[in-house]
Image (cartoon, helix red, strand yellow):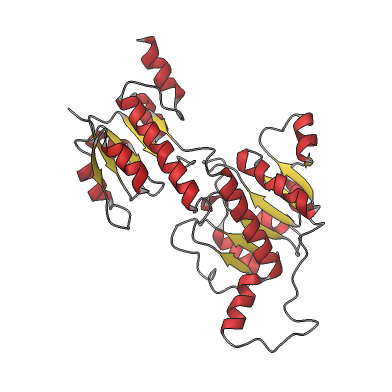
């Protein structure tokens, strides 16, 4: 019997074809997330699921899928999955780290440049025929070169963002739960700061931490109040890291100069008033959105899905305890 798997959204065809050679694939062919009831109905006889961040994989869903042997998440993050419950049931949970690092770092810099130099705002003005012609004081922005970049979270993506800052001759400061060794700080050209100090000193604050209960609203009203009135907040990590309502107030009142956002608290919904502000650049979760990166993610997600179904350890296992338990039997 070939294993049965559910793929909850369309993937690059090359990865799907490889999966179909080994499994009976139930693919959501529509360009939308499955509803909760659709997900519960279609998971019932499945041995594996290749899920998206928009799919809530909890105890109820696992109850509906008694044959489930693996959860392969098409993302680096996995806060949509009850990993503790999956571990209790002996179900491996996997993710796709590494392959989207450089693309997300590129997008971070696109937002930094855009919001600082008012590119999207200028595009809207120009298209609307509201550009009066060149003027010495027209649409002045802020320099990026020589500024201070504050990176919160110095994992793979944070480091990739820091490496790019060298070309702009920036001072790079960072805060992370675990401080880097001194030799790595020197190699990257970065200096550690406690979070309050980073917020007070940085001209650009860029978020690169995973989302969890501990990091929910990491940046709220109090943190925004610490930032310079000329500073910008950049978020390409997870939406709920930022209290979006507090951010709208800070942007509206000029508490900070602007923001560049690729992720949101309640995607695809925006906090009330956010879309009306000129000093924020809004991109629709494009961090990993390149052809090559999405294909690499799909290939890795397929590797992660197939491995446990073939009795092998998946390449990127979130809950190591499950596999240690299997090996000890």
Task: Give the residue drawn at x 25%, y 32%.
Answer: 47
Relative to residue 318, is residue 228 drawn left or right? Answer: right
Image quadrant where residue 307 sits: top left
Relative to residue 33, is residue 200 drawn left or right? Answer: right
Q: How many labels does the image show?
A: 0
**Residue 87 shows in the view:** yes
Extreme residue toward the top, this view? 329
Quarter of the rendering occupied by the C terminus: top left
Task: Give the residue drawn at x 66%, y 86%.
Answer: 131
Task: Give the residue drawn at x 71%, y 88%.
Answer: 133
Relative to residue 242, is residue 177 drawn left or right? Answer: right
> Which of the two residues, 123 or 45, is positioned nearer the viewer here?
123
**Residue 80 shows in the view:** no
Quarter of the rendering occupied by the N terminus: top left
Extreme residue toward the left, this view? 1
Relative to residue 108, is residue 183 drawn left or right? Answer: right
Give how far across and how far down residue 159 sits, in percent.
Answer: 67, 41
Give how far across and how far down residue 156 sits, in percent.
Answer: 61, 39
Image quadrant where residue 43 sits: top left
Above or below — where is 240 with respect to 181? below
């Amino acid at each position: 019997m070939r294993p049965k798997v559910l793929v909850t959204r369309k993937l690059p065809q090359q990865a799907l074809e490889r999966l179909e050679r080994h499994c009976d694939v139930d693919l959501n062919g529509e360009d939308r997330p499955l509803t909760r009831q659709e997900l519960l109905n279609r998971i019932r006889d499945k041995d594996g699921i290749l899920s998206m961040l928009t799919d809530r994989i909890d105890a109820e869903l696992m109850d509906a899928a008694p044959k489930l042997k693996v959860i392969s998440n098409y993302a680096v993050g996995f806060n949509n999955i009850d990993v503790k419950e999956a571990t209790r049931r002996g179900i491996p949970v996997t993710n796709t780290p590494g392959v989207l690092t450089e693309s997300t770092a590129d997008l971070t810099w696109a937002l930094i440049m855009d919001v600082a130099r008012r590119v999207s705002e200028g595009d809207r003005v120009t298209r609307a025929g509201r550009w009066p012609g060149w003027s010495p004081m027209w649409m002045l922005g802020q320099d990026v070169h020589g500024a201070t970049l504050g990176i919160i979270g110095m994992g793979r993506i944070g480091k990739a963002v820091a490496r790019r800052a060298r070309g702009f001759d920036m001072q790079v400061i960072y805060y992370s739960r675990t401080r880097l060794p001194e030799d790595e700080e020197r190699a990257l050209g970065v200096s550690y700061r406690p979070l309050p100090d980073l917020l007070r000193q940085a001209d650009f604050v860029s978020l690169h931490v995973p989302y969890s209960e501990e990091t929910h609203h990491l940046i709220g009203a109090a943190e925004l109040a610490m930032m310079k009135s000329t500073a910008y907040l950049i978020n390409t990590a997870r939406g709920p890291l930022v209290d979006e309502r507090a951010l709208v107030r800070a942007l509206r009142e000029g508490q900070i100069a602007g923001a560049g956002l690729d992720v949101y608290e309640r995607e695809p919904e925006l906090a009330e008033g956010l879309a009306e502000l000129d000093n924020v650049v809004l991109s629709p979760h494009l961090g990993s959105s390149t052809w090559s990166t999405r294909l690499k993610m799909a290939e890795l997600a397929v590797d992660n899905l197939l491995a446990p179904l073939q009795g092998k350890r998946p390449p990127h296992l979130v809950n190591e305890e499950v596999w240690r338990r299997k090996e000890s039997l």
